[in-house]
Amino acid sequence: MTGKTLYDKIWDAHLAHEAEDGTCLLYIDRHLVHEVTSPQAFEGLRMANRTVRAPEKTIAVPDHNVPTTPDRASGGMNEESRIQVEALDRNAKEFGIHYYPVSDVRQGIVHIIGPEQGWTLPGMTIVCGDSHTATHGAFGALAHGIGTSEVEHVLATQTLIQRKGKNMKVEITGKLRPGVTAKDITLSVIGRTGTAGGTGYVIEYCGEAIRDLSMEGRMTVCNMAIEGGARAGLIAPDEKTYEYVKGRPHAPEGAQWDAALEWWKTLHSDDDAHWDKVVTIAGDEIAPVVTWGTSPEDVLPITASVPAPGDFNGGKVDAAKRALEYMGLQPGTPLREIAIDTVFIGSCTNGRIEDLRAAASVLKGKKIKDGMRAMVVPGSGLVRKQAEEEGLADIFRDAGFEWRLAGCSMCLAMNPDQLSPGERCAATSNRNFEGRQGRGGRTHLMSPAMAAAAAVTGHLTDVREMM
Ligand SMILES: CC(C)[C@H](C(=O)O)[C@@H](O)C(=O)O
Ligand code: SF4
């Protein structure tokens, strides 16, 4: 018998039933809920006269629609957003689930507060009606994004119907070079495998460069597994994981902690496990990268130039043509010469304390370029508080950044933080699709340090020149 992967182990531990055709019923340990994909699910429960099966394992927070300006308590949401947030307020109360309302300092982006509050633990199955649920895989949890009808199913039964995915290993060997971050790893992987490279797979990220990352960095890597097409991404837990988790409000304590630790220590892929696909990248070959197009796979080292459609094959030729047109870019332009209007630092990819530290270390004592619009949106109220205590907020403000309250903000155009048509943004988020940050808006994805560097110079910049 061959060994098991980490994915196999978590799957087997949660398998409640397997039908002959391979359809499985998985037990779910944590159900995270936000306001966009849950109203109809709760409505469905109500219509069927059902309750939430495990309210103590269900955690809700509004994040996508909420304004991030200091005056948000007094409104500022459009009608549709307000209805969604009010529905969550009501549903959380009525169904008795854990809730972090907008007024709570612990409110923030669902994928940031899950780990922060200790809801996210190794070996768990975690779901949320949100594609970036993969973030929680950084703890060695199997974390799936689900759709609204599945949200209703999990609310009602605490189980999810799934088919087992295939196993893919992405190994980043050796050390990273200075100026290269978790964001550069995860974008470079997608650059290599394409946005469909992970389709049907669960990715386990491993190798020295992954082990060397902090928990924050590991979350950044797993966050974008979905942009590479994978169903989930995960990283085996280790001492760093345990240290991050220990003492968090909902982490186990005492004898329960000891028992948990014993199980967590078995959570790694066996040496003789079977992999359906393996991708290996040398850590020292990864450069600070930026995206030039309208898909996360349109990624290049900052030292490169805008490609021409003819550089690609097949369907990608037309896609590149269209992307260049939308992005308003000429082939051959050095990426470093692309002027930007706006900088957005935040999102569930890069809105954690380490991200703000990295950006602040570039900005310290500097000013953003004249006329630049720049904002930092901490991923949670607690990240914001910590950043204020560490003096990071002052560095951002002194540099000319707006210092915002927590939420998804300009990661997607679902709240007042949006780009106007043609506005070009250096963003630390995870999607650069057409219209993602506002109709006609142009997004270049990059790391927090690179975004900060761009804010200072006014154009895409190699952060290594500022180190
Ligand atoms: C609104 C939500 C369903 C969506 C997702 O699933 O990812 C959002 O978080 C996003 O990043 O596009
Ligand atoms: S920050 Fe962006 S990617 Fe993350 S959950 Fe919110 S909208 Fe989705």
Image (cartoon, rainbow, N blue to C red):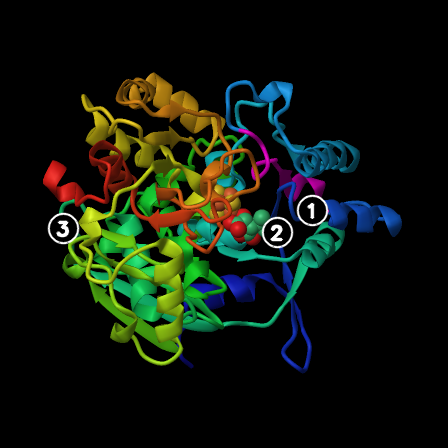
217 over 434 or under it: above or below: above
**C-alpha span from label 2 to label 3:** 36 Å
Earlier in the chain: of badge 2 and badge 3, it is 2
> Is there CB contact under 8 Å for labels 2 and 3?
no
Residue under label 2, please give it: 129
| Residue 177 badge | 3
> Is there CB contact under 8 Å for labels 2 and 1?
yes
Residue under label 1, please give it: 38
**C-alpha span from label 2 to label 1:** 7 Å
Earlier in the chain: of badge 2 and badge 1, it is 1
From the viewer's perspective, is 31 left or right of 320? right
Q: What element carries label 2?
A: loop
Crowd band around label 2 with a 10 angstrom C-alpha radius: few (<14), some (14–19), many (20+): many
**Residue 420 place in picture, x, y as percent:** 46, 40
**Residue 407 place in picture, x, y as percent:** 51, 34
Magenta residue span: 54-67
| Residue 271 or residue 162, whichever sits in front | 162
Earlier in the chain: of badge 3 and badge 1, it is 1
Crowd band around label 3 with a 10 angstrom C-alpha radius: few (<14), some (14–19), many (20+): few
77 over 160 or under it: above or below: above
**Residue 356 place in picture, x, y as percent:** 32, 32
**Amino acid at pointer 2:** Gly
From the viewer's perspective, is 339 left or right of 436? left
Q: Which residue is drawn at 57% across and 39% down?
A: 64
**C-alpha span from label 3 to label 1:** 42 Å
| Residue 385 or residue 237, whichever sits in front | 385
Q: Which residue is drawn at 87% across and 52% down?
A: 48
Residue 438 shows in the view: yes
Give the quadrant of the N terminus.
bottom left
260 over 363 or under it: above or below: below
**Amino acid at pointer 3:** Arg
Queried on whether the Cβ of the residue with tag 2 lies below 8 angstroms from ligand 1, the answer reads yes
